[in-house]
Image: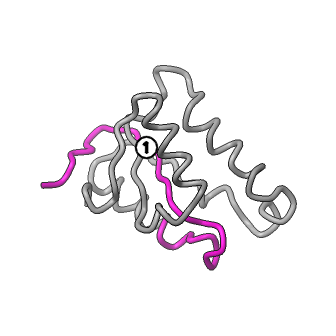
Amino acid sequence: MSIDITGKRVYLSGPMTGIEDYNRAAFDRAASDLIGAGAVQVYNPAVYINDYSARMYGHEECMRPALWELAHKPWDLTYDLLISLPEWQDSAGARLEREVAEAIGMEVHDLGEVL
């Protein structure tokens, strides 16, 4: 049974660091598939990362805007759920995003539960 995401705002999370092109292909494919499954909005962090930003700011500084996006949007624009890409458990950042989402009462699912 898959989770219905029709009309939902989705925060997409997953491993990036140490993966070729920051796992952009997997993030982009998942974002497209989630929109195709009915999500009205998908936050795709791969859109915002590149070699320059990763070298210039490092992992910790790159996590700041992601966590801000996850937890500090106005109430009427908050995400309904966080969807984790495969192998999220291997990523310190994705584990933290998931923990934050759970702590603020956001619904959390693996991508395989939705698609």
Placement of the N terminus among the 4 image quadrants: bottom left
User: Is disc 1 surrounded by few (<14), some (14 to 19) or many (20+) residues within 10 Å?
Assistant: some
* Residue 107 percent location from the top left of the image: 34, 37
**Which residue is at a point 25% across and 56% down the rendered structure image?**
113
Q: Does the magenta stretch include residue 37?
A: no
State the residue in front, 17 or 72. 17
Residue on which the image places disc 1: 41
Residue 106 to residue 35: above or below = above
Q: Residue at x 60, y 38 (%)?
A: 69
Q: Is residue 104 rendered to the left or right of residue 20?
A: left
Res. 93 image quadrant:
bottom right
Residue 68 placement: quadrant: top right
Q: Residue furthest bottom?
A: 20
Spot occupied by residue 62 in the image (x, y as percentages of width and height): 73, 52
The picture places residue 77, in percent across and down from the top left corner, at 48, 27
Q: Is mark 1 on a helix, strand or loop?
A: strand
- Color theme of the render: one colour
- Type of the residue with mark 1: Gln
Magenta range: 1-27
Give the residue drawn at x 33%, y 38%: 8
Please name the residue shown 45% across and 48% down the image. Answer: 42
In the image, 91 versus 69, the foreground residue is: 91
